[in-house]
Image (spheres, helix red, strand yellow):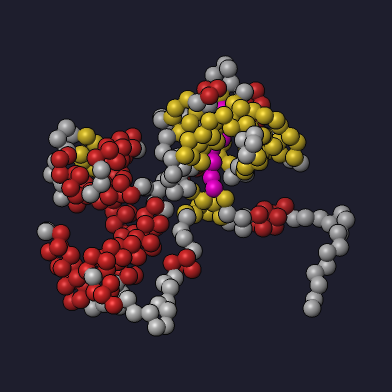
Amino acid sequence: MNQLNTAIVENEVIDPMAFRRALGNFATGVTIMTAQTSSGERVGVTANSFNSVSLDPALVLWSIDKKSSSYRIFEEATHFGVNILSAAQIELSNRFARRSEDKFANIDFDLGVGNIPLFKNCSAAFECERYNIVEGGDHWIIIGRVVKFHDHGRSPLLYHQGAYSAVLPHPSLNMKSETAEGVFPGRLYDNMYYLLTQAVRAYQNDYQPKQLASGFRTSEARLLLVLESKTASSKCDLQREVAMPIREIEEATKILSEKGLLIDNGQHYELTEQGNACAHMLYKIAESHQEEVFAKYTVDERKLFKNMLKDLIGI
C-alpha cells in the first residue's frame, strides 16, 4: 500500500491564488457583518469567514483584512451584528461587497443591541458583544459573544468556488426503499387516501427544496403564484386558494410588501413588476420539476390525471 509523504517541507512557497482556489472548495454561507459606533458611524461588509467558536459561552468569529478601511469602526464599536443572508439576498450581498459612499441608503433595517444594523428577511441574525480581537496573519480575527439571536428559518445563500449557490438535498437521501421480499401491503396500496397523501409527500421531497432555494418560504411562494394567476379576486378568496392559515398569509403579504413585490389595493393585492418576475421564476421551477416527474407518462395520461385531480378538488 502506498503511503503519503507526510514530511513537513520547511520554507515551501504557497501560491496565494492556488491556495484561494483550494479554499473555495469549502462551501460556506454568506453574511453581512454590521456595526455602529457611539458617534453614529455605520459599517457593513459581506463576509464568508463566519464560524462558531463555543456554545458556553456562546462565541462566534469572523475575520477582516488588515487593509480594510471598515476595520476601524468594528474595532471602535462595542457590538457587531451577523446577518446570515437568505437565498433571495444576492443583491444585498453584492451591494455590501462593493465600495460605496453609503451602502445603507434606501435599505430597510432594524437596530439591535449597541445600535447594530439588522437586515430584514435574513435566514438568521446574531447580535454580538465584541469579546476579543486576535491577530491572524494578514487578517484580524474578531470574536463576539452572542447576546441575542434570531432564527428566521429561511433557506440560506451559499458561496462555492467564487459563485453563489443554494441548498438542495443530496440525491441519495431521496432514494426509494425497496419493499422487502415476501411483504405484501395488500389493502393499504388500494386505499386512495393513503396513495394520495404518499404521492404528495414524495412529490414535495424533491420539489420543496428547489422552491425554498429561491429564497421564498412556502407561504410566500404560494401567494405569489396565486396572485399571478389571478384566481383569487379578493382577499377573502386568498385563504381558499393559498390553502394556509390566515396568520401565515398575513405574514407572507407583509414580507412580500416590504420587498416591493406586492401592493395592497384595499380589497385585493396586486403584484408589482418585480413580483410578477418572481412568480414567473417560481412557475419555471414548478414546471421543470413537473416535467421531470411526469416524463415517463404520455400526454393523454397526464391530461387524465390532471382532470381527475381537478374533479376531486372541485375546479
Q: As drawn, is 2 to the left or to the right of 313?
A: right
Q: Where is residue 75 in the image (x, y as percent from the top left)?
A: 66, 26
Q: Residue at x 27, y 50 (%)?
A: 222
199 and 94: which is toward the camera: 199
Q: Between 287 and 102, which is closer to the camera in this rendering?
A: 287
Residue shown at the point (23%, 78%) measured from the top left: 298
Magenta region: 29-35
- In the rendered image, the quadrant that contains the C terminus is bottom left
- In which quadrant of the rendered view does residue 235 lie? top left
What predominant SS class does the magenta segment belong to?
A: strand
Judged from this view, the residue extending furthest toward the top is 39
Residue sitting nearer the eye, 311 or 158: 311
Say whether residue 262 is visible.
Answer: no
Q: Image check: 196 left or right of 182?
A: left
Q: Tell me: residue 94, above or below residue 285.
A: above
Query: In the image, is residue 146 part of the stretch drawn in magenta?
Result: no
Which residue occupies the foreground of this view, 149 or 290?
Answer: 149
- 193 to the left or right of 119: left
Quick check: 141 above or below 166?
A: above
Q: Position of residue 22 (x, y in %)?
A: 67, 58
Counting every numbered tag in the picture gives: 0
At which x and y percent is residue 246?
24, 40
Please name the residue shown 43% across and 73% down the image: 177
What quarter of the picture does the N terminus occupy?
bottom right
**What residue is at 25 percent from the left and 51 percent from the top?**
225
Indicate whether 138 appears above or below 130. below
> Which quadrant of the figure has residue 307?
bottom left
Say whether residue 242 is visible. Answer: yes
Q: Which residue lies furthest to the bottom in this view?
A: 182
Residue 127 horizontal/vertical position (percent): 54, 31
